[in-house]
Every structure is written in C-alpha cells, then in structure tokens.
Image: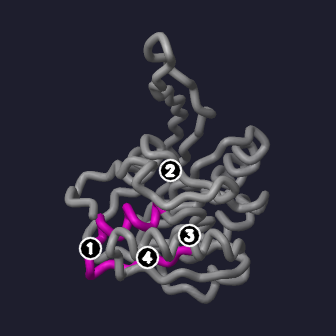
Amino acid sequence: MWKYKTPGIPDEEFERLDDVPITKEEVRVIQISKARLKRGYTVYDIGCGSGSISVESAIQVESTGKIYAVDFDPRAIDLTKKNLEKFEISNVTTILGNAKEKIPELPQADAIFIGGTGGDTKEILELCHDKIKSGGRIVLGIILIETLFSVLELIKKLNLSVDITQITISKSRKTSTGTMMLARNPVTIISVTKI
C-alpha cells in the first residue's frame, strides 16, 4: 500500500476512529527520525492508538525487525490490527493490556516509542529504561506540561542523554473563499539515549 521507504503516510490513509488517537503525520515523521531505526531492530510502540507509529516503524525495520504494539484500549488494538492488515504489515505483535504489566514480559528493545499512556508516562519510561539496550533510543511524544516536567525530572535522575524538540504544525484547509491554515496542538518530542 505504501510504496515508499520514507516515513510520512498521510493521516487519511489510516483507518480511524474519533476517540482513538493517532500520531499525526508530521509529528510521526519526526518521531521516527529521532528513533534512528535500522533493519532488524526490536521496537515497542507503547500506547499504540491507531497503530500509525507501528506501521511506519515496521516499514523501517523491515521483515527482520519486530514491533510490539501495546495499548489498554481494545478499540485501539482492533484499529491497529486493521491498519496493519491494510498496509500489509506482518512483523507487528499487538498486545492488549496495561503497559506497566506488559513491558517486563517483552524482549530487550533497540528503540521505544511512548505515546498515550493515561498519565503513567514517568513510570512507563522507568520500565522502558530497564528494557532498552545500551545505545538504544526512547522517543516520547508529550502534549501536557505536567507530563513534560515529570519526565524531565526522571531523565535527569537516570542520567540519560536527552534531545528536546517542540513542534507546532499548521495544516491547510479549503474554505469557500480560499485556503486557511489551522494550527494543531504543539507536541514536545523528547528523545533519550541509554548510555
């Protein structure tokens, strides 16, 4: 379905539900680049939502890589499965359940994406720190200031190498008289490397 190696599948190509989140196309592209994925990598997508990160990561790590998509919402897991089927992706395992319980059961990872966590981001980051290989990357997409503060506090405690990027995207929309730009919520992308 997606015939390019370049990330950035348009949002409208994914199956969607209004109440299941998706990492938007431009944010997803930056997150994928910050993870520095390679063929054969093992990757977690924590809080997979619609599965857009899982789909794009699976393309990057190719058939020798493995993605573990975790979400506590059965609708998110069902939607992720639909998108995996739509894009003909076969190297992703979907896992329904609480990430804090499921992460310890997963194999060591080369890269981890942490998205929608229901307020447990700090605890999930701590668990992921124990599961990431040396030199591995953890990429977090954060929209709440409180979450950002707690995550940065933990990163300092864990002595991780950190890169912080905040992005604000505006997308065009046709109106009856022309084209306008509509701003989306700013997203702070935190990328950490385990030394």
Residue 55, position as x, y percentages in the image: 40, 66
Q: Amino acid at mark 2?
A: Ser
Residue shown at 35% from the left, 48% from the top: 8
Query: Can residue 119 be seen by looking at this rendering?
Result: yes
Rendered image: mark on residue 186: none
As measured in the structure, the alpha-carbon distance from the residue carrying label 1 to the one carrying label 2 is: 22 Å
- Which residue is disc 3 drawn over? 79
The residues tagged by marks 2 and 4 sit, at their Cα atoms, a distance apart of 18 Å
Amino acid type indicated by mark 1: Glu
On screen, residue 7 versus residue 166, left or right, reads: left
For the residues carrying marks 3 and 1, which lies nearer the camera in this image? 3
* Residue 62 among those drawn in magenta: yes
The label on residue 62 is: 1
Q: Position of residue 5 (x, y in %)?
A: 22, 58
Question: Which residue is label 2 attached to?
Answer: 191
Which label number is shown at residue 67? Answer: 4
Give the residues in magenta.
52-69
